Image (spheres, helix red, strand yellow):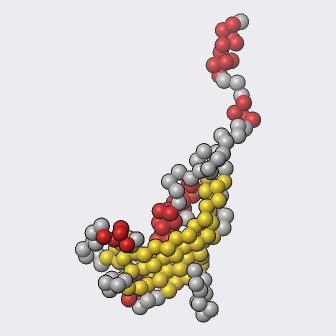
């Protein structure tokens, strides 16, 4: 991601909003940082919530003159391997284009899938944090796991005798 010297990276929170159509029409730019801990919908997939992601949100128009947002997100996450339950480092490198559709406007057909663009409804108060979080959720694997890993290590509490084994001993007496 490129960054202009006069453009500061801002920390984004749930109150950070943009008027998406005006943002796109004016070709505005927002560089930001999101703490991984702020991504609540992602929490169940994470081994820990350490670190942050940086993003760049650009307003632009596509070749047909449609207002679009371009979102780039970079950083790393520590996902939880669904096989062994240990941390799994995952590099986030997202570059997505989102065509803005006016409320009540006609949604584009499947042609968007061919050119790598998605569509979202334009909003006067588009919250930036949920937009970034949604793109990250779409990027992470559905079932994160290591290529090769073992079963989760048993803890001492898991080595207790089975209640049925205790009953069998009582029955033998």
Q: Residue at x 61, y 61 (%)?
A: 90
Q: Where is residue 27 in the image (x, y as percent from the top left)?
A: 43, 89
Q: Where is residue 85 in the image (x, y as percent from the top left)?
A: 64, 47
Q: Residue at x 66, y 67 (%)?
A: 51
Q: Residue at x 30, y 70 (%)?
A: 111
Q: Where is residue 63 in the image (x, y as percent from the top left)?
A: 35, 84
**Quadrant showing the C terminus:** top right
Of all residues, the one furthest to the top in this rendering is 173
- Residue 150 in which image quadrant: top right
Task: Tell which of 73 and 168 is nearer to you.
Answer: 73
Task: Tell which of 60 and 157 is nearer to you.
Answer: 60
Residue 69 visible from this viewpoint: yes
Q: Position of residue 6 (x, y in %)?
A: 60, 93
**Quadrant showing the N terminus:** bottom right
| Left-right relation of 29 to 172 | left
Of all residues, the one furthest to the bottom in this rendering is 6
How many discs mark residues in the rendered view? 0
Q: Which residue is drawn at 36% across and 76% down?
A: 99
Residue 15 visible from this viewpoint: no
């Amino acid at each position: 991601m490129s960054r202009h010297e006069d453009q500061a990276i801002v920390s984004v929170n749930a109150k950070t909003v943009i008027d998406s159509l005006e943002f796109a029409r004016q070709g505005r730019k927002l560089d930001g940082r999101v703490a991984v801990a702020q991504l609540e919908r992602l929490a169940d997939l994470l081994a820990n919530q350490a670190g942050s992601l940086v993003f760049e949100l650009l307003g632009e128009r596509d070749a047909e003159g449609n207002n679009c947002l371009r979102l780039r997100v970079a950083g790393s996450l520590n996902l939880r391997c669904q096989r062994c339950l240990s941390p799994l480092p995952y590099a986030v490198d997202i570059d997505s284009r989102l065509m803005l559709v006016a409320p009540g406007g006609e949604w584009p057909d499947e042609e968007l899938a061919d050119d790598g663009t998605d569509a979202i409804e334009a909003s006067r108060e588009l919250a930036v944090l949920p937009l970034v979080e949604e793109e990250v959720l779409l990027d992470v694997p559905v079932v994160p796991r290591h290529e090769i890993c073992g079963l989760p290590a048993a803890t001492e509490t898991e080595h207790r005798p089975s209640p049925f084994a205790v009953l069998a001993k009582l029955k033998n007496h």
